[in-house]
């Protein structure tokens, strides 16, 4: 019997796969068998705690592996254990990201850097503070994070009788092999993998060669950017680190120089920075995609503002409109200072290409879709937020809708038959997909429905996110449907499903919509395969899920082939005639419209730190990508801000200068008025007040901030050893309106 028993993910999947292929039927893989870890998990599941839902398979398989191990030990069967140790802080960061979507999703922020800061704070708390209330979820998270301090004792010494302290570890080779009775132990150091594993296995099994496959690449996962940011931002007090690295299950495996370097890396010895301002927390983000709906977007915004919540933000993305939709939205927002809004415009229609902007700009765990040609019925926002709060396993919530005429006259309910429904079986869902609870216009989804999967390729799947979300939600949790109508669904000639030929009786339209259906079904299979390769799909059900949705895909492929050949034989069918929303319905090419980067709302009396607004600022010309709590400008930088409060008098800009200049002048101007000069000393933060002056006849809330740093220079010109060719001007920390 071979047991890959290790608390860290590095090379675990690769080792298990290699040994399973060489020794089929005799290789097992787990991250722990002892009650120290499984007892709090049992209590979590008994309390229906959703945080550790991804651990159910691990928890369920442990008794089977333990039983097989007990039988082997009883009869003296040779048992080979492959186990590893790892730098405790690096390991805690890695396991956090492995469980990010289930245990740390509430740390999600607008940017990877801001998310990493929130995660770092949560993990530091798990290292430093013991639970006092007996909460099993907290106990489990503490034990998961602190495993390097106890795991070897609980999983290796106690059950198998090894005395690890009595055997020196070979740091140069990075592994040691120990034997006791019928058990052999290969204990390797993850920092020496994969060479240590391959050589150690060769020692255990003479005459065999071992080469580990490359599996489970963290750099390819959707959370990779957060992982990299977390490695940069995580810190603990130096005294706490010294205690951690002195632990008898850590210290013997690292040299004094390695331990000193690790403590220096993770110690909170960073220079002082401006105190972090409190940031708003949002329960939900209302997302409005706009495409040539100037005549209707105002009514959608009015219906939302009539029920607006202080814990809700708005993200509006104009997808290349050419009819004034963007200006109409700005006009509606001009009188709503209480609405935290981020708005932008794409230069051309991107379709699913908009999603990365939504994910990066939204600051909440919940996205509420509000189509720009519909209206939001009273109570929808409260109903959605309350429902997700009461049902933590819900990943997607849809509802009934009232059909409206173009002039907004009710013309009937979307559905009169369905009752409130919970959909939790991805196999059964294939037979339910034509039921009314797939109406995307009513969707509200947990952001994991997007984040848990790679970005959509608009060339492979240009349409139909709402038709993907149902399956994604049941793969990750549950979809809920409410029979109560929460949306007014406007019916007009430019509805996306009509423009795409979804309801067409014309053969061209039918062929086009069926082709889109094929693309959507192909993406569903990609989603299933992705979760399976990430180890996030129940292995006992994976085959049934893939088989049922593959059959669904093949059925639709057959439909498309028949339609295509009836229409054109072997030639591709043209797209159906476009409506007003696509080139005006005339077929002529539309001119390219310039994109508008995100416009940030600055309410009066609240400081917006760069950690909060950097993802929006770095899309404006002259700003570089945000670094931790600041963002560099070039020689000049410009951004448009939304300051809706008519009584606002001053924009307070917190900034610093370039470190290679002792003294530096920075000039700040609003709406191109005469600039205010600030004399800066290095990067020491300084607050500069810039007056806000608006003409009496100027009713909109937009102001243009111009930052001029005439002394900007590239660090490479100051010091040739520095390979940084950016022209660095000012360091921006925060913006505040008073």
Image (cartoon, grey):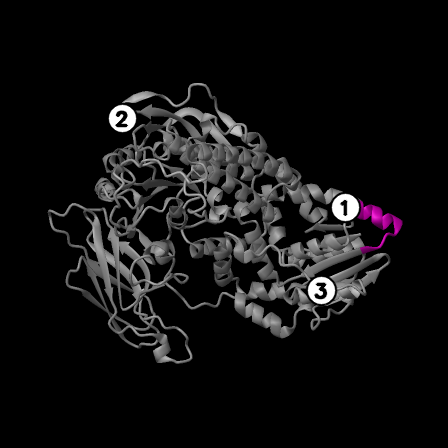
Q: In this view, does 435 lie to the left or right of 194?
A: left
Circle 3 residue: 198
Q: Which image quadrant for residue 210?
A: bottom right
Does the CB distance between marks 3 and 2 fall below 8 Å? no
C-alpha distance separating marks 3 and 2: 69 Å
Q: Is residue 542 above or below residue 693?
A: above
| SS of the residue under disc 2 | loop
Residue farthest toward the left in the current orientation of the protein = 696
Q: Looking at the image, is 720 positioned above or below residue 508? A: below
Instruction: Name the residue beneath numbered marker 1.
Output: 66
**Of 272 and 234, which appears nearest the observer?**
234
Q: Is mark 1 on a helix, strand or loop?
A: helix
Q: Quadrant of residue 205?
A: bottom right
Residue 388 visible from this viewpoint: no
**In front here: 272 or 45?**
45
How far apart marks 1 and 3 lie (CA) works out to: 26 Å
| Residue bounds of the magenta highlight | 68-79
Q: Is the magenta stretch mostly helix, strand or loop?
A: helix
- Residue 715 position, x and y percent, is 36, 75
Say which residue label 2 marks.
408
- How far is mark 1 from mark 2, CA to CA? 64 Å
């Amino acid at each position: 019997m071979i047991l890959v028993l290790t608390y860290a993910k590095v090379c675990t999947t690769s080792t298990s796969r290699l040994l399973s292929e060489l020794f089929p039927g005799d290789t097992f893989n787990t991250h722990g068998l002892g009650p120290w870890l499984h007892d709090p998990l049992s209590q979590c599941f008994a309390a229906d705690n959703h945080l550790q839902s991804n651990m159910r398979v691990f928890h369920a398989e442990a008794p089977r592996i333990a039983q097989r191990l007990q039988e082997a030990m009883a009869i003296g069967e040779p048992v080979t254990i492959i186990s590893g140790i790892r730098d405790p802080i690096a390991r805690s960061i890695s396991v956090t990201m492995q469980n990010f979507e289930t245990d740390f999703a509430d740390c999600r922020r607008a940017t990877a850097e801001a998310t990493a800061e929130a995660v770092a704070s949560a993990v530091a708390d798990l290292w430093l503070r013991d639970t006092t209330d007996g909460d099993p979820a907290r106990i489990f998270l503490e034990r998961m994070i602190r495993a390097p301090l106890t795991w070897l004792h609980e999983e290796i010494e106690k059950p198998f009788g090894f005395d690890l302290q009595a055997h020196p570890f070979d740091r140069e080779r990075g592994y040691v092999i120990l034997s006791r009775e019928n058990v052999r132990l290969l204990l390797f150091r993850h920092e020496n993998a994969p060479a240590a594993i391959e050589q150690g296995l060769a020692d255990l099994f003479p005459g065999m060669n071992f080469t580990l496959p490359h599996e489970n690449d963290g750099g390819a996962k959707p959370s990779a950017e957060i992982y990299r940011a977390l490695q940069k931002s995580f810190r603990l007090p130096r005294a706490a680190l010294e205690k951690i690295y002195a632990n008898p299950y850590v210290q013997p495996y690292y040299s004094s120089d390695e331990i000193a370097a690790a403590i220096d890396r993770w110690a909170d010895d960073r220079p002082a920075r401006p105190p972090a301002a409190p940031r708003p927390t949002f329960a939900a983000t209302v997302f409005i995609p706009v495409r040539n709906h100037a005549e209707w977007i105002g009514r959608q915004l009015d219906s939302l503002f009539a029920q607006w919540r202080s814990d809700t933000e708005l993200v509006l993305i104009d997808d290349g409109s050419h009819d004034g939709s963007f200006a109409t939205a700005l006009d509606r927002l001009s009188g709503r200072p209480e609405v935290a809004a981020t708005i932008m415009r794409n230069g051309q229609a991107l379709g699913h290409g908009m999603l990365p902007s939504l994910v990066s700009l939204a600051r909440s765990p919940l996205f509420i879709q509000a189509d720009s040609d519909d209206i939001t019925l009273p109570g929808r926002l409260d109903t959605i937020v309350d429902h997700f709060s009461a049902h933590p396993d819900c990943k997607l919530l849809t509802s009934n809708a009232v059909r409206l005429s173009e002039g907004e006259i009710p013309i009937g309910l979307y559905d009169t038959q369905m009752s409130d429904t919970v959909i939790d079986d991805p196999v059964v869902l294939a037979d339910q997909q034509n039921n009314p609870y797939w109406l995307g216009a009513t969707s509200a989804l947990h952001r994991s429905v997007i984040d848990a999967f790679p970005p959509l390729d608009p060339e492979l799947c240009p349409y139909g996110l709402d038709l993907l979300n149902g399956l994604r939600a049941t793969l990750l949790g549950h979809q809920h449907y409410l029979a109560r109508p929460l949306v007014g669904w406007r019916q007009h000639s430019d509805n996306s499903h009509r423009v795409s030929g979804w309801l067409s009786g014309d053969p061209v339209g039918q062929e086009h919509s069926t082709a889109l259906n094929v693309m959507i079904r192909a993406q569903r299979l990609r989603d299933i395969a992705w979760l399976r390769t990430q180890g996030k799909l129940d292995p006992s059900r994976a085959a049934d899920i893939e088989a049922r949705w593959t059959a669904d895909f093949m059925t639709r492929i057959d439909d498309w082939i028949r339609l295509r050949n009836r229409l054109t034989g072997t030639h591709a069918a043209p797209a159906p005639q476009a409506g007003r929303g696509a080139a005006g319905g005339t077929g002529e090419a539309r001119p390219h419209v310039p994109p508008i980067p995100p416009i940030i709302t600055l309410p009066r009396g609240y400081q917006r730190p760069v950690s909060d607004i950097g993802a929006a600022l770095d899309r404006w010309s002259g700003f570089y990508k945000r670094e931790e709590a600041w963002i560099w400008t070039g020689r000049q930088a410009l951004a448009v801000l939304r300051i809706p409060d008519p009584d606002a008098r001053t924009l307070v800009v917190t900034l610093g200068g370039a470190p290679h200049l002792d003294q530096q002048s920075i000039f700040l101007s609003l709406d191109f008025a005469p600039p205010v000069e600030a004399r800066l000393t290095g990067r020491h933060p300084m607050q500069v007040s810039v007056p806000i002056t608006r003409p009496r006849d100027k009713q909109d809330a937009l102001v243009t901030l111009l930052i001029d740093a005439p002394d900007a220079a590239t660090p490479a010109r100051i010091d040739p050893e520095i390979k940084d060719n950016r022209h660095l001007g000012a360091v921006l920390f925060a913006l505040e309106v008073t």
